[in-house]
């Protein structure tokens, strides 16, 4: 029960982060992330080795390393202010990373430096969570069903690939960021960074397969500036 | 027989002060007891680990209260994680094989009784002897340290197959510093054992009393001597193997790691090594190690059986030659652990034949014990019951060796519970039965007080029936193909096997609990037992010619002279149906 | 007490033999062309080992029953013939038994390991990694693309480290999490370890072979019965070892071709 509540809370926080609209007194950077070229196909994942997960899907779910939407929209891109904004103290609400149906929900989890991280297992099988941190402290732990959430935090900014060795198709990302000005592109590729005080910023977009790109933007007052990112996609 | 050095010089001065008497003692008897205590501590730990494993296997979602306090990462909420299960498995195997089966029957009893049985005042190198114990203790502490470091104990099993054991922390939890500690601990253990083995060999060859020819040595002395020859060679191989492993892990060498390995998404910076090299080195040590565990118990059991039967074996010589041939053959069979490991399939044939050939000396020994029982008058007590139980266990564990020695059958039985049943019975339980028998037999000599016989026999019945209930069903599981070293049974075919697993777990918990009787008996008898006479079992060998417990220099400064073969039973002597080895009265023959 | 020991021992021996004699715990039915030899060897060995086991335990029990705790001063005897008979018996009986088992046992081994696969055997590559098996079929061109460990990208289903961007051979390689094979056709399984040692064990196929990193090993077998069977890892490979499994799907030739087409369309 407690895990469920925590999960809902986590989803709510994420929703709040991505959907907050501009408030008076601050500027907003918004835009779309798209790709050009032919991206890799989202292939169906064969989960036959884990029947308890496989049976949760009518058709095999697709891979999530490159998720695209209509009009060349590119999903799961972390757009954040990499320069110009002050470091912020972490929120006390935990960022929640859930393993369900042998997939990571969300696939990309953005959280702040020193923000509590909670990892939940809602499956009937044991997962191991192995965030392949290079700058932060690395760990690798199993989480059998019915055990309490794994709680941790990261004290340095880093994009950390996360994997489960027991189910090799499970790959995700922790985006550990220094401030709360971040957004993850949705199904339409859209993102929005509200509440930016006037100033000059570097906006960076990070995609787990395609790397990152940055743009400069200057906010003066409560305006909304549009910044778009285009990633080059390759079929292989 | 020329005068030997033991006759001429006191090996060391009488100990003075608490430290010299009980801690940093040079006295082989104190060191023997220290080894015994270390073995006892290790066996208790190893047994608790096995309880946790067995419990987890059949009740995987049931909390084990308090376990999270010992390792929160390993057992969050009291539920054992898959990696902690493997940690327990690794530590169980390592503790049992190295610190129990090598220490208790060989180092503990050997240290205490080998010098006495050959009429020496101490070991040839008392300082080395002290050093081997303290080295072994350090090795033990280094191993146990793995339980308390954040990384946790290693998860690669007591065999530590490379490259799992060699690539470092990417291979999984516990494979960082936990694995380093394991490799360091075993390397230190090798040093301690090498020193001990050298000492045993030198003592046996140089310090025998006047008249004590090699063939007049008791069978258990022979067993310890043969074992120390094996140990000298075996640990001399494991030590460099461990050093190479440590180098691979810490210095960037690639003895055991080939190129192009991607472990947990990381390309490993190694090339040119061979994982099979580790397996060859490990089993070149590992198979003789099995005989290091079992030979001393064979000797102890023969020694006790002869005393209990009140007549000599049909031929002690045949037993000794059989032990020698087992020791010799043990060097040619290591490949039978590797039939399906990718070794050249032709070499499997080569390894199969010597393995099957070991059946011959083993059968000869069994027939010797059985045939000698014929026409005897067997005294039944805790010691002799465990000795008889040893024969039964040795046979039960031995016949399953028939299967595993054949490469074709090994295809289906390799890495199943059949193997677990086999080696637990033949090298684990049988060897421990030898230790139990030795303990009930010699406790009076070691401490000056006799063990409680009623408790001892109760302990035997529970242990004898209990161990069969645990380990016989392992064979059945193996015949179905139940794979070992699994922390949970997720395969489709394992469901129907769960009732049998539950039976084993309950038997293991019960049999384990029965060992508390033994521990209680040890402690109780140590302080409240009946005083031990000099020769409570009417034995013939030298340990029964001196007070219980023996003085620091064993023979009180006298130099025993040996007149007889060790086992002059069923004869008319001045004290009864036996003649002591150092008694000048003529033997019947 | 001696008599009690004898009785307990006989009960233990009989109880131990009961599940064996009644075939309570046996391997599943063999579905390979070579497996019957292993099964025969196993049952021959079981008979010999079983008889030795029961005989030894019964003799031990009998002697303890007869000769334990007799009257004080009773005249002791020795086994007629003494040690020589024992040694001779061991050499002749056990020696013959051992030789027989050893020699005949090698036939099954030879059949598995000394006969090369037929040239037209279906070539499949098996890769074992922490903690899953993946299988690769060469595709229509009949050629496997090269493996580049640095190209492994599991999140993107590139489990083998193929480089389809630069190598045409790997573009049509079919990678599957289950091992689909046609019934009654020989399969030549080439084994590749991605990270540490693993093993390939299918009880029904009577096949077990380790994956050794850096070593190109292979096994070959023919499955004679369609069905779904479990492939399990038997070489301790890390925390997920217990859950490292895959399915062997033996299908009729038509179904296998359909399966291949379906897989090719997903590329």
Image (spheres, coloured by chain):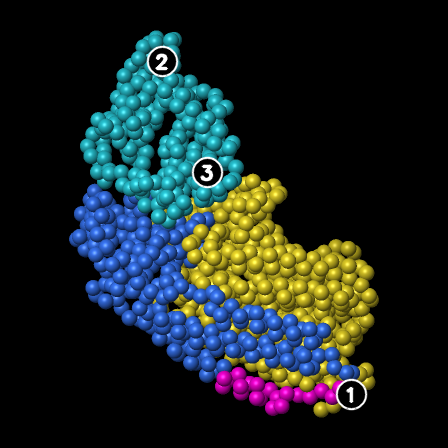
Chain colours: A cyan, B yellow, C blue
Checking the image for residue A22, the label placed there is: 2
Is the residue at mark 2 from the same chain as the one at mark 3? yes
Q: Nearer the viewer, mark 2 or mark 3?
A: 3
Q: Which residue position holds label 1?
A: B572
Q: Residue at x 61, y 74 (%)?
A: C10
Quote the CA–CA distance across marks 2 and 3: 35 Å
Residue A62 is situated, as x and y percent measured from the top left of the image, at 30, 39
Q: Nearer the viewer, residue C207 or C249?
A: C249
- Which chain is indicated by disc 1? B
Q: Residue at x 76, y 75 (%)?
A: B537
Are the two marked residues, 3 and 1, in contact with CB atoms closer than 8 angstroms?
no
Badge 1 crowding class, 10 Å Cα cut-off, few under 14, some 14 to 19, many 20 or more, is: some
Residue A55 as seen in the image, left or right of residue B213: left
Quote the CA–CA distance across marks 3 and 1: 78 Å
Residue B571 is situated, as x and y percent measured from the top left of the image, at 75, 87
Residue B3 vertical position relative to residue C241 in the rendered view, above or below: below
* Residue numbers of the magenta segment: C73-93
Residue B419 vertical position relative to residue A68 in the rendered view, above or below: below
Q: Which residue position holds label 3?
A: A121
Residue B576 is situated, as x and y percent measured from the top left of the image, at 80, 83
Q: Residue at x 47, y 57 (%)?
A: B496
Query: Which numbered disc, 2 or 3, marks the residue that appears first in the sequence?
Result: 2
Q: Residue at x 26, y 29 (%)?
A: A69
| Element class at badge 3 | strand
Are the two marked residues, 2 and 3, in contact with CB atoms closer than 8 angstroms?
no
Is the residue at mark 3 from the same chain as the one at mark 1? no
Residue C138 as seen in the image, left or right of residue B395: left
Are the two marked residues, 1 and 2, in contact with CB atoms closer than 8 angstroms?
no
């Amino acid at each position: 029960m407690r895990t469920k509540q925590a999960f809902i809370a986590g989803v709510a926080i994420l929703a709040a982060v991505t959907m907050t609209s501009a408030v008076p007194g601050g500027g907003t950077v918004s835009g779309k992330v798209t790709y050009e070229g032919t991206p890799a196909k989202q292939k169906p994942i064969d989960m036959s080795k884990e029947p308890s997960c496989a049976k949760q899907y009518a058709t095999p779910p697709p891979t999530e390393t490159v998720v695209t939407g209509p009009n060349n929209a590119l999903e799961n891109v972390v757009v954040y202010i990499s320069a110009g904004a002050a470091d912020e103290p972490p929120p006390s609400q935990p960022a929640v990373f859930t393993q369900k149906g042998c997939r990571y929900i969300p696939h990309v989890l953005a959280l702040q430096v020193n923000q509590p991280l909670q990892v939940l297992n809602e499956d009937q099988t044991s997962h191991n969570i192995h965030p392949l941190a290079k700058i932060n402290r690395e760990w690798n732990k199993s989480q059998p069903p019915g055990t309490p959430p794994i709680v941790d935090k990261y004290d340095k900014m880093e994009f950390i690939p996360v994997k489960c060795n027991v189910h090799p198709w499970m790959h995700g990302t922790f985006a550990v960021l220094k401030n709360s000005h971040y957004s993850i592109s949705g199904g339409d590729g859209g993102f929005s960074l509200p509440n930016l005080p006037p100033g000059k910023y570097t906006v960076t977009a990070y995609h787990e397969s395609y790397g990152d790109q940055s743009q400069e933007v200057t906010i003066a007052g409560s305006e909304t500036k549009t910044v778009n990112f285009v990633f080059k996609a390759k079929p292989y | 027989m020329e005068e030997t050095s033991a006759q001429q010089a006191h090996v060391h001065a009488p100990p003075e002060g608490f430290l010299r008497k009980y801690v940093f003692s040079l006295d082989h008897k104190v060191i023997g007891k220290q080894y015994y205590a270390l073995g006892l501590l290790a066996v208790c730990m190893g047994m608790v680990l096995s309880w946790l494993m067995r419990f987890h296997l059949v009740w995987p979602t049931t909390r084990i209260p308090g376990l999270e306090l010992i390792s929160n990462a390993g057992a969050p909420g009291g539920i054992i994680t898959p990696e902690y299960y493997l940690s327990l498995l690794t530590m169980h195997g390592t503790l049992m094989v190295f610190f129990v089966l090598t220490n208790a029957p060989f180092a503990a009893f050997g240290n205490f009784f080998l010098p006495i049985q050959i009429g020496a005042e101490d070991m040839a190198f008392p300082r080395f002897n002290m050093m081997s114990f303290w080295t072994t203790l350090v090795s033990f502490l280094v191993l146990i340290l793995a339980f308390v470091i954040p990384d946790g104990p290693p998860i690669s099993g007591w065999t530590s197959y490379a490259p799992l054991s060699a690539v470092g922390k990417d291979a999984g939890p516990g494979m960082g510093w936990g694995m380093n500690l394991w490799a360091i601990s075993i390397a230190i253990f090798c040093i301690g054992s090498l020193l001990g083995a050298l000492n045993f060999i030198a003592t046996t060859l140089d310090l025998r009393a006047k008249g004590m020819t090699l063939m007049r040595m008791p069978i258990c002395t022979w067993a310890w001597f043969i074992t120390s020859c094996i140990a000298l060679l075996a640990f001399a191989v494991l030590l460099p193997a461990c050093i190479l492993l440590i180098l691979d892990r810490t210095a960037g060498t690639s003895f055991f790691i080939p190129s192009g390995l991607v472990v947990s998404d990381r390309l490993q910076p190694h090339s040119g090594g061979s994982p099979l090299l580790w397996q060859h080195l490990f089993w070149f040590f590992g198979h003789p190690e099995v005989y290091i565990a079992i030979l001393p118990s064979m000797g102890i059991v023969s020694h006790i059986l002869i005393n209990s039967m009140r007549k000599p074996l049909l031929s002690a010589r045949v037993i000794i030659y059989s032990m020698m041939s087992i020791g010799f053959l043990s060097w040619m069979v290591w490949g039978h652990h590797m039939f399906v490991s990718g070794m050249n399939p032709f070499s499997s044939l080569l390894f199969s034949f010597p393995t099957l050939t070991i059946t011959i000396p083993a059968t000869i020994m069994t027939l010797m014990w059985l045939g000698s029982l014929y026409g005897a008058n067997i005294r039944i007590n805790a010691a002799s019951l465990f000795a008889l139980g040893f024969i039964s266990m040795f046979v039960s564990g031995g016949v399953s060796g028939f299967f595993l020695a054949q490469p074709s059958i090994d295809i289906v039985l390799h890495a199943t519970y059949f193997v677990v049943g086999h080696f637990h019975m033949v090298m684990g339980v049988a060897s421990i039965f030898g230790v139990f028998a030795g303990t009930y037999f010699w406790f009076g000599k070691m401490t000056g007080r006799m063990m409680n016989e009623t408790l001892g026999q109760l302990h035997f019945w529970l242990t004898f029936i209990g161990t069969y209930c645990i380990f016989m069903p392992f064979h059945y599981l193996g015949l179905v193909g139940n794979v070992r070293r699994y922390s949970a049974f997720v395969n489709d075919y394992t469901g129907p096997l769960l009732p049998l697993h539950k039976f084993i777990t309950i038997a293991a918990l019960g049999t384990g609990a029965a060992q508390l009787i033994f521990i209680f008996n040890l402690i109780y008898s140590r302080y409240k037992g009946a005083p031990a006479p000099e020769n409570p079992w009417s034995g013939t060998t030298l340990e029964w010619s001196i007070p219980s417990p023996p003085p620091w220099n064993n023979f009180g400064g006298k130099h025993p002279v040996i007149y007889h073969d060790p086992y002059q039973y069923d004869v008319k002597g001045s004290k009864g149906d036996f003649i002591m080895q150092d008694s000048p009265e003529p033997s019947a023959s | 007490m001696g008599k009690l020991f004898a009785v307990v021992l006989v009960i233990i021996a009989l109880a131990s033999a009961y599940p064996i004699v009644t075939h309570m715990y046996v391997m599943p039915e063999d579905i390979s062309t070579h497996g019957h030899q292993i099964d025969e060897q196993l049952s021959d060995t079981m008979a010999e080992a079983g008889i030795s086991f029961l005989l030894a335990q019964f003799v031990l029990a009998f002697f303890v029953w007869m000769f334990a705790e007799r009257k004080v001063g009773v005249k002791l005897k020795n086994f007629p013939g003494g040690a020589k008979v024992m040694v001779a018996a061991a050499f002749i009986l056990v020696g013959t038994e051992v030789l027989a088992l050893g020699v005949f046992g090698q036939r099954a081994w030879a059949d598995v390991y000394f006969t090369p696969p037929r040239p037209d055997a279906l070539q499949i590559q098996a890769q074992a990694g922490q903690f899953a098996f993946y299988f690769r079929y060469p595709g229509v061109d009949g050629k496997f693309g090269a493996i580049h460990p640095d190209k492994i990208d599991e999140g993107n289903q590139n489990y083998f480290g193929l480089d389809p961007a630069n190598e045409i051979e790997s573009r049509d390689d079919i990678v599957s999490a289950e091992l689909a094979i046609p019934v009654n056709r020989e399969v030549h399984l080439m084994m590749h370890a991605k990270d540490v040692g693993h093993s390939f064990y299918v009880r029904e196929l009577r096949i077990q072979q380790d994956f050794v990193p850096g070593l190109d090993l292979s096994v070959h077998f023919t499955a004679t019965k369609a069905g779904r069977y479990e492939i399990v890892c038997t070489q301790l490979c890390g925390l997920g070892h217990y859950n490292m499994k895959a399915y062997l799907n033996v299908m009729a030739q038509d179904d296998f071709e359909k399966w291949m087409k379906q897989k090719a369309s997903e590329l």
